[in-house]
Image: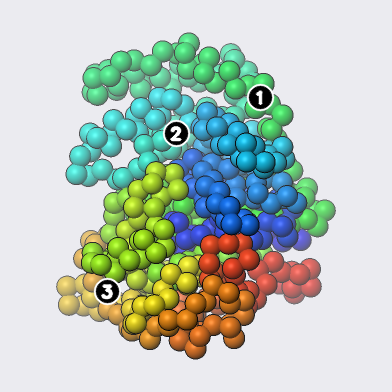
Amino acid sequence: MPAIVIVGAQWGDEGKGKATDLLGGLVDYVVKPNGGNNAGHTVVVGGEKYELKLLPAGILSPNATPIIGNGCVVNLEALFEEIEGLQARGADTSKLRISANAHLVAPYHQVLDKVTERFLGKRAIGTTGRGIGPAYMDKVARLGIRVQDVFDESILRQKVEGSLKQKNELLVKVYNRRAVDIDETVEYFTAFAERLRPMVIDATYVLNEALDRGEVVLMEGGQATFLDVDHGTYPFVTSSNPTAGGASVGSGIGPTRISRAVGIIKAYTTRVGAGPFPTELFDEMGIYLQKTGGEFGVNTGRPRRCGWYDALLARHASRVNGFTDYFVTKLDVLTGIEQIPVCVAYDVDGVRFDEMPMTQTDFHHAKPIFEYFPGWTEDITGSRTMEDLPENARNYILALEGMSGTRISAIGVGPDRDQTIVRHELIPTSSQTEAR
């Protein structure tokens, strides 16, 4: 049976949580393959709003086992705080599992994140300050601490000492901060050991065995394509690979076992943090999209920058990820807008680009060239088929499909789980899988 990947096709906050939650009742495992507690999801179930940060959105699906994959970085304090918050609201978190190979966010990662952002000044990236980048830096530098290390104090201490030898020099001599105490750091991690132990598994083995049994695994990427450290708008990116290829690495599921890659994309575009954004709005319409769409960060509450749909981004994301389907979210937010612009090309210093420019310099200077589509005023939140939509809303979706390089298989018309139009099933049947 198939492994399915859900990936954000813009700069994050596209509604991946809703898509994961919608499919969660149809799958056996939901895996978060990258990111940390900087990669939040908002899920609305039965009118109740859940803001998830580190936990997979599948935690709210009663039939699915949620797994934090090896590609994630885990803040243990934030993990248990989030678990307790869900339990207080009656949610069952007992099935949650964590890969033994996932890396941990240490308190000193958060300190470094904040002081380095301040040190960068105008060149600051706009991180959440939660230590995600420094934790990934340690992982790549082979100075990281993994979940499994918490259960062996001797190894844990060696790794903490190795990591802090350099960092304390940096904190004291460059940033004028006090050195981090090794004993305090070791005690911080070991305090979580017994509570953590029942959750920890060999996720690669568990997930591949599940696929061998014919079960369905859904991988929900954090952040999004244009925040990918390789394929995004570098350096204004995250520190992991939230593209479809990264989902394979971050879960331990081989790429040949992935049968469906679903891109989640808003009917307009948003971005949090610094970095280029060709269709960004700086007028009243930008404020309208922000307020109507509830465009404020799940983790930080920061207002999201808002702009129109960008077909060049959509096509590029489709290529990078090999999308089989698009799930367009928040179509209802556009209701009442008389004319809806869509970016169909860029103007870069008088030169037209019909695809994303190759260089960072050109992308920074890109100005959108728009095509305009007539809007609609009818309430679409009760629509459940394409035929239920007003003609102009249908035409808008079909136009986006033609421009974006991938079929649109689902459309969100409201925040709740059931406020979705499904044109094509996102989970292939066994016969579809065999045909591939």
Color scheme of the displayed model: rainbow
Q: Secondary structure at mark 1?
A: helix
Q: Secondary structure at mark 3?
A: strand
Residue 156's place in the image compared with 254, above or below, is above
Q: Quadrant of the C terminus?
A: bottom right
| Residue occupying the far left of the picture | 349
Answer with mark 2 or mark 1, whichever residue precedes in sequence. Answer: 2
- At a point 76% along the width and 61% down the height, the residue shown is 1
Report the amino acid beneath label 2: Ala
Q: Secondary structure at mark 2?
A: helix
- At a point 30% along the width and 15% down the height, the residue shown is 178
Residue labelled with disc 2: 135
Say the numbered circle drawn on residue 274. Answer: none
Between 188 and 142, which is closer to the camera in this rendering? 188
Report the amino acid beneath label 1: Arg
* Residue 196 in the figure: left or right of residue 358: right
- At a point 58% along the width and 37% down the height, the residue shown is 85
